[in-house]
Image (cartoon, rainbow, N blue to C red):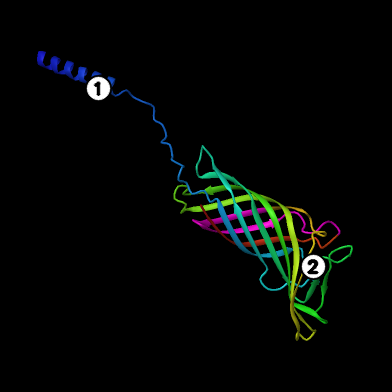
Amino acid sequence: MKKILSLISGVLIVASVTAQENPETKKTKPKIDMSNRANDHFLVQLGYTKWAGIPDSINTKGFSKSFNVYFLFDYPFKTNPKLSMAFGPGIATDHILFAKTYVGIKDNTSGILFTDQSDTTHFKKTKLATAYLEAPVEFRYSAEPLTDKGLKFAIGLKVGTLLNAHTRNAKLEDKSNAAINDYVMKESSKRFFNKTRLSASGRIGYGHWSLYASYQLTPLFRDGLGPVVRPFSIGVTLSGL
């Protein structure tokens, strides 16, 4: 009996010493090292663009495109590193192509005119280009924020100010499409355009590549100075850094 009591006393003493040496601590969530996180600072976009609400009398043709470049600062949420907000500056350009149409961007008229010249002398190629300084704001989700190899999506708004609007006309032809003169005529004016634009945007993809879509919420032209059209575009985005 004495041996049993001595054994029990020894076990209790050892347990007491062990408990003192290893006190129970509260469990804490391990901190995630975000120092090497891929932030998608740099975005390059190439897409197809078109005008919503364009009248049937305006003849567009070919692959009208958008080309955009942004540098965004990305800030992950402390409570969830998969979520973040991003914002920063960028340049966005649209290039709309027309078929046998004269775009009176610099004419002294009460509004911009798109004149069909298919039955008379015309340029073979006509392009209307606009360039904006933009400030996008994005809400982002990344399934693998540390490796940058998972599913991603983003939604946001872009505020822009008009930097330039110009037309480029090339290769003068007669009504039978026979060449008259191989030269280029450029005209530039911002008079008919809204100087500020607001656009909604979204992206979804995997890793460095994603599909994007954007829609201009404000009309392209000033009230009463042109057709009520709103550019939209869809395309691909390459992101990194």
Q: Secondary structure at mark 2?
A: loop
Please state which amino acid type lies under the numbered disc 1. Thr
- In x, y percent, where is residue 24? 33, 24
In the rendered image of this protein, does residue 231 appear above or below residue 141? below
Would you call the spot at circle 1 few (<14 residues within 10 Å), some (14-19), or many (20 or more)? few
The stretch drawn in magenta includes residue 131: no
Q: Which mark is residue 149?
A: none
Asked whether, in this view, residue 207 is left or right of residue 70, the answer is left
Q: Quadrant of residue 121?
A: bottom right
> Residue beneath label 1, please?
18
| Residue 232: image location, x then y, percent | 69, 60
Distance between the Cα atoms at labels 2 and 1? 84 Å
Segment colored magenta: 200-224
Rendered location of residue 129, percent (x, y): 72, 64
Residue at the spot x=53%, y=51% of the render? 40
Residue at point 76%, 54% (across, down) = 218
Residue 206 falls within the magenta-colored stretch: yes
Left or right of 130 on screen, residue 112: right
Q: Nearer the viewer, residue 217 or 40?
A: 40
User: How crowded is the residue under tag 2: few (<14 C-alpha within 10 Å), some, or many (20+)?
Assistant: few
User: Which residue is the extreme one toward the top?
Assistant: 2
Q: Disc 2 marks which residue?
A: 55
- Disc tally is 2
Query: Residue at left 71%, top 73%?
Result: 61
Find residue 2 and report its image quarter. top left
Frontmost residue, 87 versus 234: 87
Query: Where is residue 81 shown, x and y percent of the image?
Result: 50, 42
Q: Nearer the viewer, residue 15 or 128?
A: 128
Q: Secondary structure at mark 1?
A: helix
- In terms of sequence position, does the residue under pointer 2 or pointer 1 come before the other? 1
Q: Main secondary structure of the magenta part?
A: strand
Residue type of the residue flagged with mark 2: Pro
